[in-house]
Image (spheres, grey):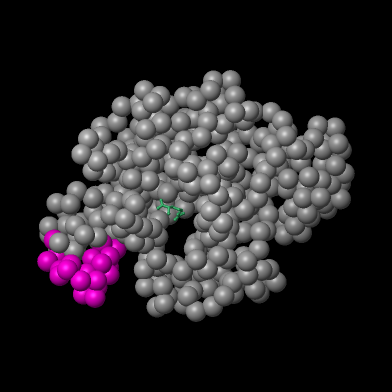
Amino acid sequence: MTVPGYRDEPAARWDPAAPADPGEAEDFLRQCYTENQRLGPVEPRLAIVRAQIAATGTYVHTTDELAYGAKLAWRNASRCIGRLYWRSLVVLDRRRARTADEIFSLLVNHLRTAGDGQIRPVISVFAAAQPGQPYARVWNEQLIRYAGYRGPDGCPKGDARQEQFTAAMRGYGWRGKGDQFDVLPLAIETPAEGVRLYELPERAIREVPLTHPEFSWFAELGLRWHAVPAISNMRLTIGGVHYPLAPFNGWYLGTEIGARNLADTDRYDMLPTVAARMGLDTSRESTLWRDRALVELNVAVLHSFEAAGIKMSDHHTESQRFLKHLSNEEKAGRPVPADWTWIVPPLSGGITPVFHRYYDEMDLRPAFYLDEPAAALAREGCPVRRTH
Ligand code: ARG
């Protein structure tokens, strides 16, 4: 079923058999060489790339082109409020890795490079897809996610969003602990080896137990979250070349955890529990018990990350930074594509400055696109096995 306007619909279809589009290659290279004068004139490079595409159906980015293309994909990501720092992205060129073992160890390395305190935005770019050839990818939506189970009584446990994925992993023989915050294995698919499951080592998973600055009972809820959000189901598209495996991370904005992951009714659904512990009157909506519980949950998230020394932003600060980004880009004469429904934070929207304006909506490339199996997974809630 396709839901029109569904937020996880891929913005652009991709035909994995099609050759790299020479027009898109030229647009990207001109932009890359114009914005980076030190790379020299673009014309000789264009001639090489045209010849490569004519001979092989695709072309190979230089290290500089790859690094700048990845930064541009971030700068163009219309759903991201954190784009002020797009130039600081650390780009790890992993195009040579082939086996699942190699990919896994580089993913562990990615998480360690992202850091476990002062978190750095990092992307690992693995091999580009070759037209008509099978390619490697990771099935997980993020490198670190918690499993979701349903007990015999029908009660959900863990991250309900991951129930189908968790069931698929169990189908492949994975046995989790079955608790609330059980880190899923990585499912790495390569053309030569099919899908293989890997357990992340503890040193790659930094987590923060949640406490509240005033409510001592909060710790008893046993809540926690991981420090690094690392998206692994988006395809990076640069100048007509597609990188199906290019996981990237930033640092968290508190509301992602406090107002969505732990609060959404189809995720951890913690508001009724928090409200009960706060002693709020939950008999009527008009007591605003949900809103009061939501604020305290978000206070706990920000407080706990700060206490653990892990970088995290709050929605007020990040909204101001986004406006700074808009004005920087305007000065540089560039449009900033932005999706209001994603930019405005899910808590206190109207008291952040990003609420009170409209944005340009455009599909600029280079870009990150949710890959199609991942989009189907999000829509239908079922694991999709790619058939090449
Ligand atoms: N919202 C997602 C999550 O809760 C993470 C999306 C990316 N976020 C980021 N701060 N880079 O896990």
Percent x, y of residue 301 = 29, 59
With 70 as the anchor, is 316 left or right in this view? Answer: left
- The quarter of the picture where residue 166 lies is top left
Does residue 81 lie above or below 24 as drawn?
Answer: below
Instruction: Report the magenta residues as a range.
Output: 277-299
Q: Is residue 319 visible?
A: yes
Percent x, y of residue 182 = 29, 38
Query: Is 293 contained in the magenta span?
Result: yes
Q: Quadrant of the C terminus?
A: top right
Does residue 153 lie above or below 30 as drawn?
Answer: above
Percent x, y of residue 236 = 62, 45
Percent x, y of residue 37 = 75, 57
- The residue sitting at 25% across, 34% down in the picture is 178
Q: Would you say the magenta stretch is mainly helix, strand or loop?
A: helix
Closer to the camera in the image, 331 or 5: 5
Numbered-mark total = 0
Closer to the camera in the image, 293 or 202: 293
With 187 as the anchor, is 159 left or right in this view? Answer: left
Q: Is residue 310 visible?
A: no
- The residue sitting at 40% across, 78% down in the picture is 351
With 278 as the anchor, is 118 left or right in this view? Answer: right
Give the residue furthest to the front. 1
- The residue sitting at 17% across, 68% down in the picture is 283
Closer to the camera in the image, 18 or 164: 164
- The residue sitting at 20% across, 71% down in the picture is 284
Query: Is 220 contained in the magenta span?
Result: no
